[in-house]
Image: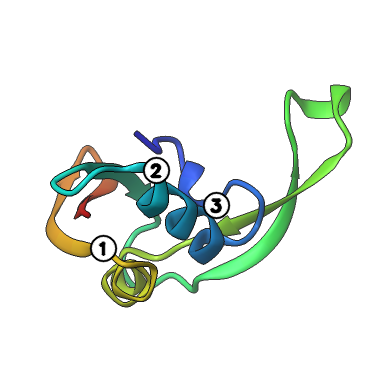
Amino acid sequence: MLLDGNLGIGGDPLRLLRRLCGLLRPGGRVLAEAEAPGLPTRSTRVRLHGWRSTWQPWALVCIDDVEQLAATAGFRLAVTETSEGRWFAQLDA
């Protein structure tokens, strides 16, 4: 599960998804949270736990871009859902 925008860990969501695809067996799946439709997919930096960490690379991935990103990484977008303003995708290996 990649919730709270964790599809962006490391700032390179394609690299992350390729790694996950390599770890899963056929039929495995990833549940990921993405940004709302219409927002730009972009790379940024964040500080985890506020001032207590160094700046880390992060990516914000729009739900509109998840299907192409997933396909490039070796996944199939099975379904997208929204709940309370949050967007989720199920990616099947």
Percent across and percent down for residue 70 are: 32, 66
Q: Quadrant of residue 84?
A: top left
Q: Residues within 10 Å of mark 3 (few under 14, many from 20)?
A: many
Of label 2 and label 1, which has the lower sequence position?
Answer: 2
The residue at 45%/60% (across/down) is: 18
Kindly identify which numbered label has been placed on residue 8.
3
Query: Dot 2, how many residues are within 10 Å of its Cα: few (below 14), some (14-19), or many (20+)?
Result: few
Q: Quadrant of the C terminus?
A: bottom left
* Mark in the foreground, 2 or 1: 2
For label 2, the residue is: 23
In the rendered view, would you say 92 is above or below 14?
A: above
Left or right for 18, reference 78? right
- Give 66 or 16, whichever is nearer the viewer: 16
Q: Position of residue 50 (x, y in %)?
A: 78, 27
Q: Is residue 56 above or below residue 72?
A: above
Disc 2 marks which amino acid?
Leu
Q: Residue at x 50, y 71 (%)?
A: 41
Question: Which residue type carries mark 3?
Answer: Gly
Q: Judging from the image, what secondary structure is the residue with disc 1 in? A: loop
Residue occupied by mark 1: 75
The mark closer to the camera, 2 or 3, is 2
Q: Which sits earlier in the primary sequence, circle 2 or circle 3?
A: 3
